[in-house]
Image: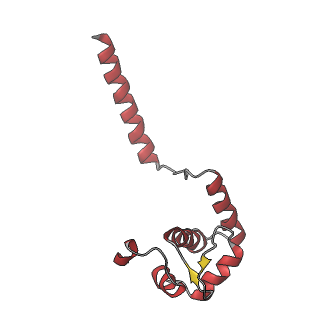
Amino acid sequence: MLESNKKLYYSIKEVSEMTELKPYVLRYWESEFPSLKPSKNRAGNRTYKKQDIQVILDIKKLLYQKKFTIKGAVEELKNRSKNPVEEKILSSSQISALSEIKNELKNILNILNRH
């Protein structure tokens, strides 16, 4: 995928190979996901942009890894487009570390305010 930085458009075959999805799956997803609408060239062949490939990878992750239904994945993508900042869930150790950092910063601020 090194050449991907140079190309603007990809064929369905190239996208199929990059995403490890069959072309018929990609065509089916177009009918189910409003956010996936690759353009077509004069010959009527699909031409995918990097943005389209990212949407495909997002859909693949939602369906195959997170086990969303198609309907659920459509809703998730809609919600993400309304709120583009994806919420990240922090682990308890991350929360604990952030809390320690916050307390240290408060201590430093108190020391600076004293002088």
Residue 96 placement: quadrant: top left
Q: Is residue 23 visible?
A: yes
Q: Tell me the residue at 38%/73% (across/down).
A: 6
Q: Please name whichever residue, 17 or 69, is drawn nearer the observer in this view of the structure.
A: 17
Q: Residue furthest top?
A: 115
Q: Please name whichever residue, 86 or 98, is drawn nearer the observer in this view of the structure.
A: 86
The image shows residue 10 at horizontal and vertical percentages of 49, 80
The image shows residue 20 at horizontal and vertical percentages of 49, 83
Quadrant where the C terminus sits is top left
The image shows residue 106 at horizontal and vertical percentages of 38, 24
Quadrant where the N terminus sits is bottom left
Q: Tell me the residue at 52%/72% (across/down).
A: 49
* Residue 99 in the figure: left or right of residue 71: left
The image shows residue 3 at horizontal and vertical percentages of 36, 77
The answer to whether 23 is drawn above or below residue 68 in the figure is below
Q: Is residue 65 visible?
A: no
User: How many marks can you see?
Assistant: 0
Q: Tell me the residue at 65%/52% (across/down).
A: 82
Its colouring scheme is secondary structure
Q: Which residue lies furthest to the left in this view?
A: 115
* Residue 13 in the figure: left or right of residue 108: right
Q: Tell me the residue at 64%/69% (across/down).
A: 68
Q: Please name whichever residue, 92 or 78, is drawn nearer the observer in this view of the structure.
A: 78
Q: Which residue lies furthest to the front in this view?
A: 42
